[in-house]
Each structure stands twice: as C-alpha cells, then as structure tokens.
Image (spheres, helix red, strand yellow):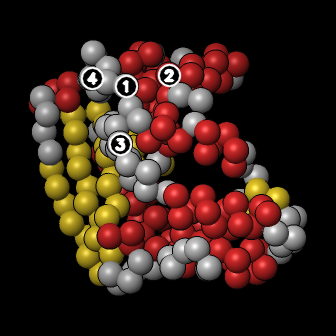
C-alpha cells in the first residue's frame, strides 16, 4: 500500500469509466492519493481539493491509541456499535474519533483491513516528494483543533500554476459541531471549484 499505487488505481478507475479528466476531492489518505495523482497523471485532473492533509511525511506514530482501541474491539465479542464504543472508550478520550471509527463497524466487524493498515502505517503517514510539484489549481482545507467544541477551519488556496506558491487564508470560528464543519468544508470546496470555472 503506497500513494503511487493508489494514484494508479485512480487512473485505472478513470480509464474503466472512460473519464478523461475529473475534479478530485480527497480527505486524509484520499487527499494524499489524489495529490500523488498530480505526479502520475496531472493531465487527468481538472481541479483538486485535499481536506485535512498535506503532502508531507509526518514521521510520527500519532494513531497508536486508535489502533489499540480498534484491536481491543476486534479481540472482543462486541457485535454492536454500542458495545464497541464502550470498549473503545477505555483507550480513547475523543468521542468524535470513536463515533467516526464506528461508522466502519458493522455486524461485529470492521469494514477496513486493520492488519494491513497497521502493517502499512509508515507508508500511510509517509510521503515521497515529487520532482514535479503541484502545477494545477489545488484547494487545501486544513481543519485544526480536531473541530470538537470550538472549531476553526483554515482555508488555504494554492494556485501554483498561475501565481506561484500563493496562500490566501480565511478563518471561520465558532462552536459548530464536527459534522456541521465537515459539511461546511465540503461546501467551501465546491464553491471554490465552481468559482474557478
């Protein structure tokens, strides 16, 4: 599992669907996958939105508590999300993260491949620098402070092709719920894409 391979999967999907060029919106790993696509097939990208991720090697194991919680559920006989949540709370204090993860817990099983994610973690948090850089319009939404009680969304607009490395920042603060902020971030992304057409 690595981002160049995921980018190739995206190209293969575009080919299978007979799509020449598309606008991509990717969150977290999906954001890195579409950023990797800029090195592999930039001509297949119309516009790109990367949410909550940057094209950098994070160098740090920041998710060990999450893996501990997921593994504890896997090793238990939990069948419902409520049972799984009770187990996860023994390892995690962030209710929003627990609820997000539980979206992938169905009928007593995780929908994602936990052993592969654990094994490939260095590749997931890593990043291989491209010689080409991003040469097309790219909106990067970086959500900070985990958007729990008080939320701040930093919006960076990068248009490397026309203006070099330009950063236009906007701050949105308030006490909106996490899901409301995700919808807001997506609306901003779509608005920015439409504004450049």
**Is 158 placed left or right of 3 in the picture?**
left
Please tell me whether residue 164 is drawn above or below residue 54 in the rendered image.
above
Rendered location of residue 159, percent (x, y): 21, 34
Rendered location of residue 8, percent (x, y): 57, 19
Q: Write down the quadrant of residue 154 in the picture.
A: bottom left
Q: The C terminus appears in which quarter of the rendering?
A: top left
Rendered location of residue 14, percent (x, y): 61, 22
Q: Mark 1 or mark 2: which comes first in sequence?
A: 2
**Residue located 47% across and 19% down the image:** 44
**Residue located 50% across and 76% down the image:** 94
Give the Cα distance between marks 3 and 2: 18 Å
Q: Secondary structure at mark 3?
A: loop
Give the Cα distance between marks 4 and 1: 11 Å
Nearer to us in this view, 145 or 25: 145
Category of crowding for the residue at label 3, using alpha-carbon neighbours closer than 10 angstroms: few (below 14), some (14–19), many (at least 20) = few
Give the Cα distance between marks 1 and 2: 9 Å
State which mark lies toward you, 3 or 2: 3
Q: Which residue is mark 3?
A: 59
Give the Cα distance between marks 4 and 3: 20 Å
**Is 42 placed left or right of 140 in the picture?**
right
Q: Secondary structure at mark 1?
A: loop
Q: Which mark is residue 133?
A: 4
Give the Cα distance between marks 4 and 2: 14 Å
Q: Mark 3 or mark 2: which comes first in sequence?
A: 2
**Residue located 13% across and 39% down the image:** 166
Label 3 with label 2: CB-CB less than 8 Å: no
Q: Secondary structure at mark 2?
A: helix
Q: Which residue is mark 2?
A: 4
Q: Which mark is residue 128?
A: 1
């Amino acid at each position: 599992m690595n981002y160049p391979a995921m980018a190739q999967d995206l190209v293969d999907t575009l080919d299978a669907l007979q799509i020449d060029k598309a606008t991509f919106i990717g969150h977290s790993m999906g954001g890195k996958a579409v950023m990797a696509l800029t090195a592999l097939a930039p001509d297949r990208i119309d516009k790109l939105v990367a949410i909550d991720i940057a094209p950098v090697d994070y160098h740090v194991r920041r998710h060990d508590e999450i893996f501990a919680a997921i593994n504890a559920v896997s090793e238990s006989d939990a069948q419902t999300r409520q049972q799984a949540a009770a187990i996860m709370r023994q390892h995690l204090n962030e209710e929003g993260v627990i609820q997000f993860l539980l979206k992938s817990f169905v009928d007593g099983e995780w929908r994602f491949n936990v052993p592969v994610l654990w094994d490939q973690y260095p590749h997931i948090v890593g990043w291989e620098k491209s010689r080409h850089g991003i040469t097309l319009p790219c909106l990067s939404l970086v959500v900070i402070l985990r958007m729990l009680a008080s939320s701040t969304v930093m919006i960076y607009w990068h248009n490397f092709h026309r203006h070099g490395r330009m950063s236009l920042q906007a701050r949105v603060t308030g006490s909106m719920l996490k899901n409301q902020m995700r919808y807001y971030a997506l609306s901003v992304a779509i608005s920015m894409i439409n504004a450049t057409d």
